Amino acid sequence: MKHHFADEYSKINGVLQKIDPRIKIISTVLFVLLVNITSFNNSFSLIYYTFILVLCTLLANVPLLRIFRKSLVSLPFIIFFALFSLFYHHRQPWFSGIIVVKAYLSILTMILLISTTSFSHFLKALQKLKIPVVLVMIFSFMYRYLFVITDELMNVKTAKDARTVGGSKWFHTKVLANIIGVVFISSYERSERIYQAMLSRGFDGTIRTLDDFSLKNRDYLFGVSALMIFIIIKIMEYSLR
């Protein structure tokens, strides 16, 4: 089965790919925070944030269309939340539209971060930033074995399709539910075996990579530049109130 890896653009030659993952994570978190605290009365600032996001995507040599396709899966949830806020708070339609834009920009930013950062480096950067080890390990195993579980589920489904011809929709739904249960149990048992194997090999919860992180001049320049741009945008917001 062919998989699309989240960090598929992390090895290409781009500006963002060369930046230290810790700087990228901090800048991304700050960017998302500023986008979401933008006042609804100064919603024009979202245009500046959109321009910054598009510029960073171009500097990273990541296809805009590819990022857009990856983000489509989140749109139904964003739109549902926006409609819920519209009916619950009795706001104007533009209020829900701004919520959609803010959430969508946040999703695009996170996709760009993951796409331009090797997943092992991303995990190590989280560890360096003192994120709880438990969360880092959950992210690690979720990403590593998601593809294994998906392959197993598809193989079992193929075997089921080859052995069941015809039948009612209820029958196929029942069989599919049984398949999901079997895959869940086998995944749980596999996780126990993997955990015991890791402990027997001296695993202590530390993420280790061949590359070590060291901040360079370009990392400081990127971080300072991002901070200055964010400050300028916020100053412009307050000056135009």
Image: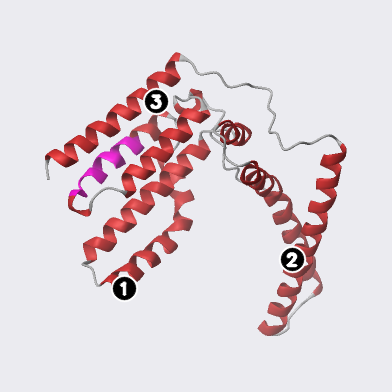
Residue 165: give x, y in percent of width and height. 76, 77
* Quadrant the C terminus occupies: top left
**Would residue 196 be found to the left or right of residue 220 on screen?**
right
180 and 190: which one is in front?
Answer: 190
121 vs 148: above or below: above
Circle on res. 157: 2
Magenta stretch? 42-54
Circle on res. 88: 1
Residue 70: give x, y in percent of width and height. 48, 49
Q: Amino acid at mark 3?
A: Gly
Dot 2: within a 10 Å radius of its alpha carbon, few (fewer than 14), some, or many (20 or more) residues?
some
Which secondary structure, mark 2?
helix
Using the rendered view, name the quadrant where residue 188 is placed.
bottom right
User: Which of the marked residues, 1 or 2, is nearer the chain's N terminus?
Assistant: 1
User: Which of the marked residues, 2 or 3, is nearer the chain's N terminus?
Assistant: 2
* Res. 205 in view: yes
Circle on res. 223: 3
Question: How many angstroms separate mark 2 from mark 3 (CA)?
Answer: 48 Å
235 and 122: which one is in front?
Answer: 235
Which secondary structure, mark 3?
helix
